[in-house]
Amino acid sequence: MITALAGGVGAAKFLSGLIRVVPEEELTVIVNTGDDIELYGLHISPDLDIVAYTLAGIVDEEKGWGIRGDTFHCLEMLRKYGYETWFNLGDRDLATHIHRTMLLKRGLRLSQATREICRSLGLRVNIIPMTDDRFETWIETDAGLMHFQEYLVRRGARDRVLGVKYVGAENAAPAEGVIDAILSSDLLIICPSNPIVSIGTILSVRDVREAIRRSRACKVAISPIVSGAPIKGPADKLMRGLGLEVSAFSVAHLYRDFLNVFVLDQRDEAEKERIEGLGIKVILADTIMRTLEDKVRLAKIVLRECGL
């Protein structure tokens, strides 16, 4: 069995290669929900949806999110009614959020609603939110405290980061199946996702980090930082705001208490010795995933390294 910890776009790319080389039924994906937000009365789960849409083959690959070929007529009408429409939600995408919200109002937990959505999309992968409890990532900036989506989407990550708050982390319990998946896996993969607001959120949920430490699985992380910059997203601004060096080494250092293997991009070979000094085995590879062949190749490297 394989378990992956995942954020959004970068993780979804890697996972789309992984499901080409392992049976979907053998894969569990624990997904960040710190990005979740309520808009227009609907529960939006951006990372859950990016992963599900990508693995279902319907994601808009050019944008990396949303549904391919979607229209935005609903947002256009909401704008006419005076609503702010800074968060782009396509019409078919909105159907997912409506469905999720209705399921939640019927009393289902987020993990149960996610299972229903995945079933309807024809997925056999076990996708689980990190928690069923309220959990929101907020960013402290020089312009004030704001939800991560407001910082990233509405304000284009232009504000200087002063800190990151995980609102609800003190009470958030792992969703059903999270701990069991971690402890029963042969391979645990930390996807190439933002180490602060994607993987960091998952690790902050009660008992998750300890379960990873206890797990006998081979634990592999793929660097989301290449040549001192993230492939996508504001990881550099967040890391810098927290006083962290923006480097692959810094990411490995954040995971040093449990990691066995770190997949380092070949462009960062100069960091190999430093990371190995943390007691972590380093594998050099091309981690840039432009094509399906790239994604499959990277997935095979991870599997081969752990003897799978």
Image: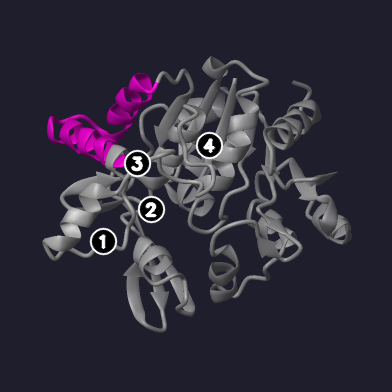
Tell me the element at label 3. loop
Q: Main secondary structure of the magenta part?
A: helix
Instruction: Mark yes or no: residue 138 visible.
Output: yes
Real-space CA distance between mark 4 and mark 3, rounded to the nearest whole angstrom? 13 Å
| Residue 37 placement (x, y as % from top left) | 29, 53
Task: Give the mark nearer the N terminus: 1 vs 3.
Answer: 1
Residue 205, label in figure: none
Q: Which residue is mark 4?
A: 211
Residue at mark 3: 173
How far separated are the C-alphas under marks 4 and 2? 23 Å
Sequence-wise, the earlier of marks 4 and 2 is 2
As drawn, is 177 to the left or to the right of 215?
A: left
- The residue under label 1 is 85
**Secondary element type, mark 2:** loop
Question: Closest to the observer: 283 or 12?
Answer: 12
The location of residue 46, given as percent across then percent down, is 38, 46
Q: Which residue is rendered at x = 57% and y = 42% of the image?
A: 11
Q: CA distance from mark 1 to mark 4?
A: 40 Å
Q: Amino acid at mark 2?
A: Asp
- Position above or below: 18 against 83: above
Residue type, mark 3 in image:
Ala
